Structures are given as structure tokens and as C-alpha cells.
């Protein structure tokens, strides 16, 4: 431990990064450690007996936690992000993408470079094959151009890859929209290198975002991990083109598991790059995307200036359970609210929340809107 810089040891970020450097400790273990031990520093300095009481924490893991190696690696990474002016986001920070916090496998730590708010009111992810066709690229360009007029504050998320991803980023830049590239490697490089200039341009009104530390290679399995961030930090995922197998379909499946809306652009049955989208639609895993107006209407974003609904009479409280009353109170303060925002506001999982929302719908107290939005009747 004496190899560590003592000034760094007082830095909370050091312990937060170190939590992701412990061999054998994933997101679930890390969250359990935080919950039981109380804070990051206590995980590395607190009572070993308390560590032993945590379910799933073996003696071997305790040895790894108390080894100075995790803190040494964390110090190196902290030096790197301070030197390169990289922003650091722990999952309890206000700057962390709040939509991700409801995802059970969301990263504990994110690193970013750029000028952006990851908690914009409207965020969508646009994904697709690396071998995009003119059909897909034309649709992507036209869609983003049109939606930039309807919802100029919308943020576009993608993965900086060839094909649909880079088309979406460049169209967002062209139309002065915020865009975020989620990377499958650390911020010490840009992959693919050909997209470096686009990456630089997007940082003026967007960011590069990753969970990976420096010196992490863009290995294949990292792209799969990256996809859960692309899906989780958005309100909806749009698949523009995809063959029957590919990362875009994985992203769509993850988005469905997170209760995000998924849209797919249909194409001719003769086009290989539309076969994945067509299957998503036929399997009811995605809504058939027709045009920008259809998307905005489906998401319930066509009218941002809805008049406030009159409060339901307080007598209704006599008919509501405690959980129902909590939802009622939150919705009474807002015109509409997305189910994921409700989940975060009430600290209740989306799965549990849906059951209570259904009860309120049956009582005709709330109504479900397109795009996972809810409001009082």
C-alpha cells in the first residue's frame, strides 16, 4: 500500500474506480458491497468480518478486495483521466445517465470526454449494420434532419461504428443536435481510427462515453457489453438496418428487457440488410417505423405543450393503496412521466411498478400513453 500516492487515497474517485478493478467483482457484487459497507472507502478499509457477511463474497474475493493491486490500478487510471481532462461519473452521481440507473447490469463507472448533459429530456439510440445501404443511410439522414426541426433538443446515441452508427452521428452534427458515441474501449484511442475527425467534432455538442479504462482494446465481447449502455441510456432504440444476426439485434433485445421502446425500419424481403428489421417487426419485438411523424406520435412527443390536467379530487385517496397513492402524488406534479423516470423517482423496479400502474389504469385514474408515458386521467 505504501506504493500509493497518499494524496490520492483521500480522493473518493480513487475508491470508486478501484471498485471496478477488483478481479471477480462484477456489477452485482459491487452494488452489494456498496449497500452493506456504506461507502467506497469502507470496502477497502472497513471491517473484514462485515465483508464476510455479504452473500456471494468468498474468502478469495475478500483477498482480492484487500489486495493493493486494485488501488494501484485505480491510481493509474485516475492520473490518466486527470491528465486528459476526462469526466468521471459514478452511478450515484447526478451526472450519471439516470435512465441507466434502473438497469440491473448498468456500469458502476462511466468515463466521458465532451460537452453534454447525459440526462436530456429526450434521448434516442440509432443503431444498425456496419454494411448499411443507400436506403438505410438516406432514411437515417432524412429522419434526423426532420426530427431536428420537431425536437431540436433531442439527443442521438450510437456507437461510432461503420455504417448506420457513423451516419447517425454525422447527421446529428450536421443538424446541430447533441450526439453521444458509446465506445467499446478506453478513451486513450478512437476506433475505428477513420472516424477520429467525427469524434472530435461531436465533442463540441456531445461526448464520447465508455465504461472501459484506458489500455482496453476494442475486443469483440466489449462491443456486446457496450450495447447495453446504448440501449439503457435512451428512451427508444431505432434499428435502421440489420441482417438476421448482428449487434443491432442484441441491442434491440436488451432494450426490450429494459422496457425501452424499439422501432425498426422495414425493407424489401429481398434485401439481406433488412431481414433482421423485418424479423423484429414480425416477432412483435419492434414497432414498424414509417416516418418521423409516426415515431414522434408513437412516443407521445408530438405536443410538448399539453395543458395541465385538473387534480383528481382528494376523496380518491380513500380508494388507493399506499403504492398507488405514491404514484398518484408523483404524477400530480407532472403533466406526463415515463415509466423509467417513475421507477427512479419512487425507487421501485419497473417490473413491480407495472403491476401498480395496471391497477391504477383499471381504476381509470391514470392512462398509458405511447412511448411508455403515463398521466392522470
Image (tube, rainbow, N blue to C red):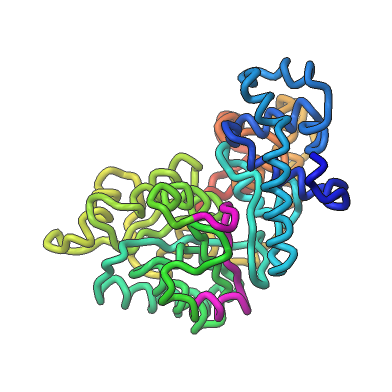
Q: Using residue 341 as the reference point, say whether residue 246 is left or right of it.
A: left
- The C terminus - image quarter: top right
* Residue 164 picture location, percent across and down: 36, 68
Please tell me which residue is depicted at 71% across the width and 57% down the height of the picture.
88
Q: Is residue 197 above or below residue 65?
A: below
Q: Quadrant of residue 268?
A: bottom left
Left or right position of 93 against 237: right
Report the label total.
0
What residue lies at 70% left-to-right and 19% top-to-bottom? 54
370 inside magenta stretch:
no
| Residue name at image x 48 percent, y 52 percent | 226
- Residue 302 in view in this figure: no
Magenta residues, start to end: 198-216
- Which one is in front, 88 or 119? 88
Is 72 above or below relative to 335?
above
Q: Residue at x 73, y 37 (%)?
A: 68
Position of residue 312 measured from the top left corner of the image (x, y, whole percent): 73, 42
Image coords of residue 177 (percent x, y): 56, 76
Q: Is residue 266 above or below residue 104?
A: below
User: Is residue 215 located in the magenta-colored stretch of the structure?
Assistant: yes
Task: Return the residue nearer the eye: 309 or 196.
Answer: 196
Q: Residue furthest bottom?
A: 174
Q: Nearer the viewer, residue 33 or 269?
A: 33
How far across and down, in percent of the image, does residue 340 sit?
60, 45
Amino acid at each position: 500500500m505504501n506504493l500509493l500516492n497518499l494524496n490520492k487515497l483521500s480522493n473518493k474517485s480513487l475508491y470508486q474506480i478501484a471498485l471496478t478493478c477488483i478481479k471477480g467483482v462484477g456489477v452485482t457484487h459491487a452494488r452489494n458491497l456498496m449497500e452493506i459497507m456504506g461507502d467506497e472507502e469502507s470496502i477497502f478499509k472497513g471491517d473484514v468480518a462485515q465483508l464476510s457477511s455479504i452473500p456471494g463474497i468468498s474468502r478469495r474475493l475478500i483477498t482480492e478486495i484487500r489486495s493493493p493491486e486494485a488501488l494501484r490500478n485505480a491510481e493509474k487510471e485516475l492520473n490518466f483521466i486527470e491528465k486528459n481532462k476526462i469526466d468521471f461519473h459514478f452511478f450515484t452521481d447526478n451526472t450519471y445517465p439516470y435512465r441507466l440507473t434502473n438497469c440491473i447490469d448498468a456500469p458502476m463507472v462511466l468515463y466521458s470526454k465532451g460537452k453534454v448533459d447525459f440526462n436530456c429530456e429526450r434521448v434516442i439510440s440509432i443503431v444498425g449494420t456496419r454494411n448499411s445501404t443507400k436506403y438505410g443511410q438516406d432514411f437515417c439522414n432524412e429522419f434526423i434532419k426532420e426530427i431536428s426541426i420537431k425536437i431540436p433538443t433531442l439527443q442521438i446515441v450510437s456507437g461510432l461504428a461503420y455504417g448506420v452508427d457513423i451516419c447517425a452521428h454525422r447527421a446529428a452534427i450536421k443538424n446541430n443536435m447533441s450526439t453521444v458515441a458509446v465506445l467499446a474501449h478506453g478513451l486513450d484511442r478512437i476506433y475505428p481510427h477513420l472516424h477520429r475527425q467525427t469524434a472530435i467534432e461531436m465533442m463540441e455538442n456531445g461526448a464520447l462515453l465508455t465504461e472501459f479504462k484506458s489500455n482496453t482494446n476494442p475486443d469483440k465481447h466489449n462491443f456486446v457489453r457496450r450495447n447495453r449502455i446504448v440501449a439503457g441510456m435512451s428512451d427508444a432504440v431505432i434499428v435502421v438496418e440489420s441482417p438476421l444476426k448482428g449487434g443491432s439485434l442484441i441491442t434491440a433485445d436488451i432494450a426490450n428487457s429494459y422496457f425501452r421502446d424499439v422501432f425498426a425500419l422495414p425493407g424489401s424481403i429481398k434485401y439481406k440488410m433488412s431481414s433482421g428489421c423485418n424479423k423484429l417487426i414480425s416477432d412483435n419485438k419492434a414497432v414498424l417505423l414509417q416516418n418521423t411523424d409516426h415515431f414522434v406520435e408513437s412516443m407521445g412527443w408530438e405536443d410538448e405543450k399539453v395543458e395541465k390536467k385538473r387534480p383528481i379530487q382528494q376523496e380518491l385517496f380513500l380508494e388507493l393503496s399506499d403504492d398507488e397513492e405514491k404514484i398518484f402524488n408523483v404524477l400530480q406534479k407532472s403533466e406526463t412521466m415515463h415509466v423509467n423516470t417513475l421507477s427512479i423517482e419512487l425507487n421501485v423496479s419497473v417490473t413491480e411498478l407495472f403491476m401498480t400502474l395496471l391497477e391504477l389504469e383499471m381504476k381509470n385514474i391514470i392512462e398509458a400513453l405511447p412511448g411508455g408515458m403515463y398521466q392522470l386521467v
